[in-house]
């Protein structure tokens, strides 16, 4: 399965040393140029910058439909807009956490997941302890309400967006 990521999942997974999960599940991840700029160039010195820059399996690609990006930028930041458009252009799973971005992607009919979805999949595959990893994610500054945390912990299967995907490329 082809996957495109926005910046937040890359940074969040890097903060908890779980960025490798994206490679394990998808082989390679595509990011638009704006996401690379946000994480690596403007984020230089911050968590995620060196990790993303050093991963040969994270591929930066330009977005073709600039008009669609500009239209989405009315309500989203440029990185989210480019990730959504690139995902649509590549017919790829979109990895995004922002609520407005997720809503826009769903309205466009895109398959989506987020940082927590990746962690649920890894937990389902026996690759990590979900509770400890979610606690670490929250400690690293990832916003997750107590209600969402409880809901995630009660899930007994992998996220529906990823069912039927081919884990471990």
Image: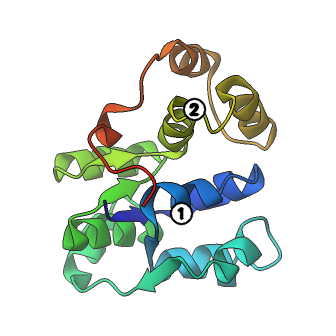
Answer with the quarter of the image where residue 141 lies.
Answer: top right
Residue at image coords 78%, 64%: 47
On screen, residue 129 versus residue 164, left or right, reads right
- Between 73 and 84, the residue placed more toward the observer is 84
Above or below 95: residue 89: below
Answer with the quarter of the image where residue 138 lies.
Answer: top right
* Residue 151 position within the rendered picture, expressed as x and y whole percent measured from the top left: 51, 15
Position of the N terminus by quadrant: bottom left
Residue at image coords 49%, 47%: 97
* Residue 99 position within the rendered picture, expressed as x and y whole percent measured from the top left: 43, 42
- Between 59 and 26, the residue placed more toward the observer is 26
- Between 14 and 106, the residue placed more toward the observer is 14
Q: CA distance from mark 1 to mark 2?
A: 16 Å
* Residue 89 position within the rendered picture, expressed as x and y whole percent measured from the top left: 21, 73
Residue at image coords 72%, 72%: 51
On screen, residue 144 versus residue 34, left or right, reads right
Dot 1: what SS? helix
On screen, residue 101 versus residue 135, left or right, reads left
Answer with the quarter of the image where residue 38 lies.
Answer: bottom right
Q: Which mark is residue 140?
A: none
Q: How is the image coloured?
A: rainbow
| Residue placed under numbered mark 1 in the picture | 23
- Can residue 8 be seen from the camera position used here? no
Position of the C terminus by quadrant: bottom left
Q: Which mark is residue 123?
A: 2
Above or below 74: residue 49: below
């Amino acid at each position: 399965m082809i996957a495109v990521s926005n910046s937040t999942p890359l940074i969040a997974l890097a903060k908890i040393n779980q960025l490798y999960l994206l490679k394990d599940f998808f082989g390679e991840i595509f990011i638009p140029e704006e996401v690379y700029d946000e994480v690596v160039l403007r984020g230089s010195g911050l968590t995620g910058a060196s990790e993303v820059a050093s991963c040969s399996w994270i591929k930066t690609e330009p977005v073709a439909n600039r008009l669609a990006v500009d239209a989405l930028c009315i309500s989203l930041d440029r990185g989210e807009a480019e990730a959504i458009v690139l995902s649509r252009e590549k017919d790829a799973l979109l990895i995004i956490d922002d609520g407005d971005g997720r809503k826009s992607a769903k309205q466009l009919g895109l398959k989506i997941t987020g940082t927590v979805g990746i962690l649920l999949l890894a937990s389902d595959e026996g690759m990590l302890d979900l509770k400890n990893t979610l606690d670490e994610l929250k400690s690293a500054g990832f916003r997750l309400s107590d209600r969402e945390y409880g809901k995630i912990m009660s899930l007994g299967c992998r996220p529906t967006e990823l069912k039927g995907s081919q884990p471990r490329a």
